[in-house]
Image (spheres, grey):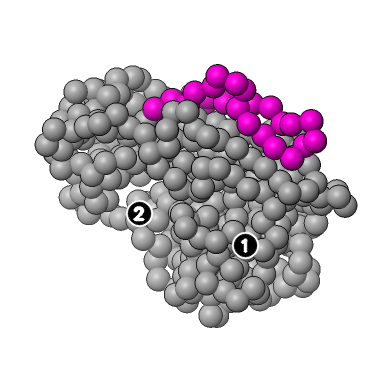
Amino acid sequence: MAVVGPGVTCVWKRAGRALAVAGLLAGLVGCTAADGGGGIDIGLPGKARAPGDVIRVSPEDGSRAVPAGGPVEVKLDSGRLERVSVVQVEDGRRTEVAGEVSADGLRWRPRPGTRLALAAKYSVDAVALDAHGRRSARHTTFTTAVPESRFIGYFKPENRSTVGTGMIVSFGFNRPIENRAEVERAIRITSEPPVEVVGHWFGKERLDFRPAAYWRPGTKVTVELGLRDVEGAPGVYGIQRKTVGFTVGRSQVSLVDAAAHTMEVRRDGELLATVPITAGAPKTTTYNGKMVATELYDVTRMDGRTVGFGGEYDIKDVPHAIRLTDSGTFLHGNYWAAASTFGSANVSHGCVGLRDEKGGSADSPAGWFFDRTLIGDVVEVVNSQDKEVAPDNGLGGWNLEWDEWKTGSAI
């Protein structure tokens, strides 16, 4: 038996740290929105580079219509690049761009002759070391130019992945879709065992699919895209025809009680642990509602200046970070608050914090939970003095009742 927090115990089953993460990091991320609810992600196009942000990436974060010839570059003024990963993310598949770090460690560029794919989304992840061995992380994204009068849909989860029981199949389109029924009909989602899956549109550029209840563990899901030559808007046609799929792993649903300062972690319905937490402070509360893990980073940076604060925090090495919303709500390790905070007070800027150590410890509550989390796992927050998370903020669609979800279908 091992203590998870003051007066709370659970059985620790140390699993190998099989980090199912594409890289060591994310970009600058924030914990809260200006209205005090949930959070806003940073790295928006046109934002000035924050002081201390030593890693520079070209194209700028959020750039669109980048030519196939780039340029793509990651550089520093001093220190050295420890690692750089530039990945094409399209239809659930990831393709690494071959590149090299210069001899002086200050610059990364693709190999000569490398061309980017058209109509593709790319992510850039970089880690740098300064002269004192301290690490900084940067994450950006950009999309390449799309052929005239064509549309594509970016798909998640990744092809052939194993996900949690709360995974929602989500498509983001690069152009507004006017003929939503035609596009929705061209995407066919089936499962074994069979279950009804229905689409729901959020505006003209996003279409999510889910069943009435969480997927059963072990379900095999197949997504067939028949978008090629489908007219999504007048004179605008799809270009994709492919089949992808994923597997639903075990069920893990965690209940965060913001008033009690605890998180109950249940695996296949059985209680694994009750973990002390800290949630959003009274002026920067945490959203209520069901949220789904969409990204895992074993270290990331959080800078309050990027979300409207006056420099209250800029933490370059936040450990064990799990994204819950697009707006910037994370469940993450916290090494800077006193140990007595967890289980007794809410002090964060909208995120859910678990006790951790600087550098991240696998034996901490945050490390323990991180090692047992899959993309698609559900975290539900209750008893927070905030509104319910919007159904299109991250994969928040489980907050809609089934009848209401079905009204968002175009067919």
Q: Looking at the picture, how far across and down is residue 365, in whole percent?
A: 72, 54
What is the three-letter code of the residue carrying label 1? Ala
Question: What distance separates the C-alpha of mark 2 from that of mark 1?
Answer: 28 Å
**Residue of label 2:** 392
Is 93 one of the magenta-colored residues?
yes
Can you name the residue that lies furthest to the left here?
A: 234
At horizontal 76% and vertical 66% (from top left) the residue drawn is 336
Give the position of the C terminus as an image quadrant: top left
Task: Indicate whether 356 appears above or below 145.
Answer: below
Q: Is residue 139 left or right of residue 8?
A: left
Q: Using the rendered view, name the quadrant where residue 96 is placed.
A: top right
Q: In this view, does 200 lie to the left or right of 366?
A: left
Q: What element carries label 2?
A: loop
User: Is residue 296 among what the camera can see?
Assistant: no
Q: Looking at the picture, how far across and down is residue 136, in whole percent?
A: 72, 51
Along the viewing direction, whichever of 236 and 398 lies nearer the viewer:
236
At horizontal 79% and vertical 30% (from top left) the residue drawn is 103
Task: Indicate whether 42 appears above or below 294.
Answer: below
Along the viewing direction, whichever of 274 and 142 lies nearer the viewer:
142
What is the three-letter code of the residue carrying label 2? Asp
> Which mark sits nearer the N-terminus, 2 or 1?
1
Along the viewing direction, whichever of 170 and 107 lies nearer the viewer:
107
**Residue of label 1:** 50
Task: Indicate whether 78 appears above or below 264.
Answer: above
Please tell me the numbered disc located at residue 125: none
Magenta segment, which residues?
92-118
